[in-house]
Amino acid sequence: MSAIEKEVKEMQQKKIAEQVTTFESGNEMAAMAAAQINYHIMGYFPITPSTEVAQYLDQMKARGEHDIKLIPADGEHGSAGICYGAALTGARVINATSANGFMYMLEQLPVQSGTRFPMVLNLVTRSISGPLDIRGDHSDLYFALNTGWVILTARTPQAVYDMNIMALKIAEHAKVRLPVIVAYDGFWTSHQKRKVNYFKDRRVVQEFVGECPTDYNLIRDLKKPVTVGAHMNGDDLINNNYQQSEAMYRAGEVFKEVAAEYAALSGREYSELDLYKMEDAEIAVFLLNSAAESAKDVADKLRKQGIKAGVISPNIIRPFPVEAIKKALKNVKALLVGERADSYGAHGPNLTHEIKSALQEDKENNTIVVSRVFGVGGKDFYHDDAEHFFMLALDAMNKGYAEKPFDYYGVVPGDPEKAQKPVIEPQYGDVYKSGLIQVTMDEETNKLKVKIPPLRALTSKPKRIASGHGACPGCGIFGGLEMFFKGIEGDVVILYQTGCAYVTTTAYPYTSHKQHTIHNLFQNGPATLSGTVEAFLELKRRGEIQVSDDATFVMVTGDGGMDIGMGSAIGTALRNHNLIMLEYDNEGYMNTGSQLSYSTPKGHMTSTSNVGKTQQGKAFHHKDTAQIMAATNIPYVFTGTEAFPQDLVKKAAKAQWYAKNVGTVYGKLLITCPLNWKSDDRYGTKIVEAAVNSNFFPLYEVEQGITTITYDPEAKNKKIPLAEWFKYMGKTKHLLKEENKHILEDLEREVELRWQRLKAKHENPYL
């Protein structure tokens, strides 16, 4: 009998299904599990480091490897709503998110668990802002503890795959019917590749999870109408909460049942607690997810020195495995609980207190519990760090108490003698006043007249953003922004929403900004700056601050920020605050790796609108943000690009006047992104010029409700077809092929329709 035949026979005897060995990351394995299950719906929104899950699924979709309907949401709050709506319809649903994206959807999560509709959410853990940090800790995960979702924790890419399969079976179990989170560490587990096994035949996975339940879906049967989420009084709600609580505890028992069934199928076991060398351990560390793997090597080292050390890491934390904890710690004399997040003011993070609570119920247990917060913001955890944790436990065991029961580990105190010196000097006031730009109101037309000098004369005004930032070669953001700011006289206060413009110009303790600069998240920039400007004006009115000249308040957004931030932007516009909202449009979520945004044109290729045998780029047309903002009746709306510098500088001067004297201004700048447009970085200006001359990005303004086209390619005999613009970019090359001619023609019709509507508004002031 050959070795292969022997292996097959052994597999058959053990009833272990055939598997393929590969080398993949956690995000890849989450996508693999989802594709094999073949969910009905994924509502998603990109955020680092979970974004890849949707990207991999989109690539697989383009290759025809699954039938999941991928729905790009307007933000995480929207993605959670999509998932909830799909779940209550009876569909199988999956999602993935991280950090502030999880926080943004947080309001929706108790709705789903409280109404008992299952789904699976991959939470790729990451530090929560602020300050902004995209690396991994568990500050987002700890907000999940009270959402009513079952929570599984995966230490390795293998566990990510396995638990994604187990999670759905648990969620849909008749005794549970609750949504499930699979949490794994951002960048460590999500991106690092490790050896994994997955089932060769997807039917094995589908048979394991079983048929999609039909006994609690709603919309499928229109003959049996029901009401979901009805208002309850306290007497009813407490009963509902009790039932949900009981279901959560039953989920712990179901987890063990499903894990045993999965072990028989896969050969991989997942108990409530992963216990390493805990049989006779006297000291131990309790660590969540990937850090536990590092600690195991140290436990081996200490064992060789005669120290009985062990490691505990949970595979499930909701419901919290109380009985397993008590059993594991029965003979342990000292335990160090390391957690990558704090519960501020509670004298220890969440799991520390849950372990202490479990031990308090065991009157015979005398384990000393020491708590340390570590690894916040992605701070690495090395073998030396794990050894330090073991030594803290050993010290507590030897003394019979912990000298400092709770503390932070890895804090580096500052040294005043090593204080950072400013790299660039701030600039303000007169240095930004050229005195060469004149803006006056024409009383007859009720429009502004602007006179600007030759652009060469404005080069004496210093740049608002210093060199040395980390933007990609050829990035169009800063050329566009700096050209706009040439038309702004005096000081500015700028708020940047998260995106390339911000993250490439600030990395603590350094900044490329020479004037007041604020950061807030994608969805809340306009509202934040409206509070800033109103506070500034109110303090000035009361005489509590003295300024000779008001600053101009500018919010800079891009990278899809006018998708997730649209509601905040419209609210700010309707309130008509004295500020400018400036969008740099790079036609995608470029700061997270070129996912489609609502500004991505139809047919264009991104990492979530891939090109393959079943799809050819983005499936729907781009959002006309300028027209949406014009509909709010703010005093001034404009479009611009650095390829037409005089036009942009004039519009900037108008924008400043209106923002200071009338109210809210919105401007949209088309800028290039060579990396993700797959274009030559030398041709940035040429590309955006072609976008204008093809009428895809018309230059116009809406001033006091009156639309004026400020550059007409047709009148100047410079009109070009869309295909001329597309030839410069790799993301559109497929649209020039004969088999995709219908997509190009559809986009041409849409562009022409929008252009004709714009011309009609230009010709008729009442439109």
Image: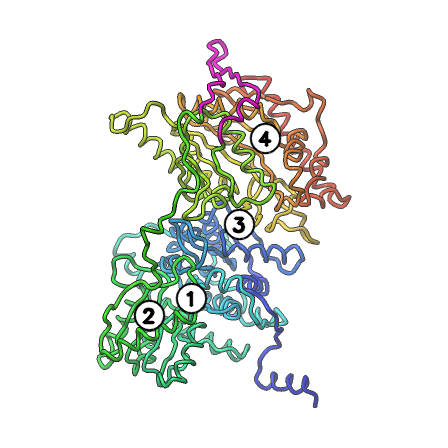
Mark 2: amino acid: Val
Residue 381 marker: 1
State which tag comes first along the sequence, 1 or 4: 1
Answer above or below: position of 371 versus 765: below
Q: Quadrant of residue 183?
A: bottom left
Of 460 and 481, the residue lying toward us: 460
Q: Element at badge 3?
A: helix
Query: Could you tell me if residue 460 is visible in this image?
Result: yes
Residue 409 in the figure: left or right of residue 465: left
Mark 4: amino acid: Glu
Distance from disc 2 to disc 4, alpha carbons, whole Å, reads: 55 Å
Q: Which residues are magenta?
A: 433-462
Where residue 318 sits: x, y (%)? Answer: 37, 66
Q: Quadrant of residue 388?
A: bottom left
Residue at the disc numbered 4: 642
* Few, some or many residues within 10 Å of mark 4 (<14, 14–19, 20+): many
Of 361 and 40, the residue lying toward us: 361
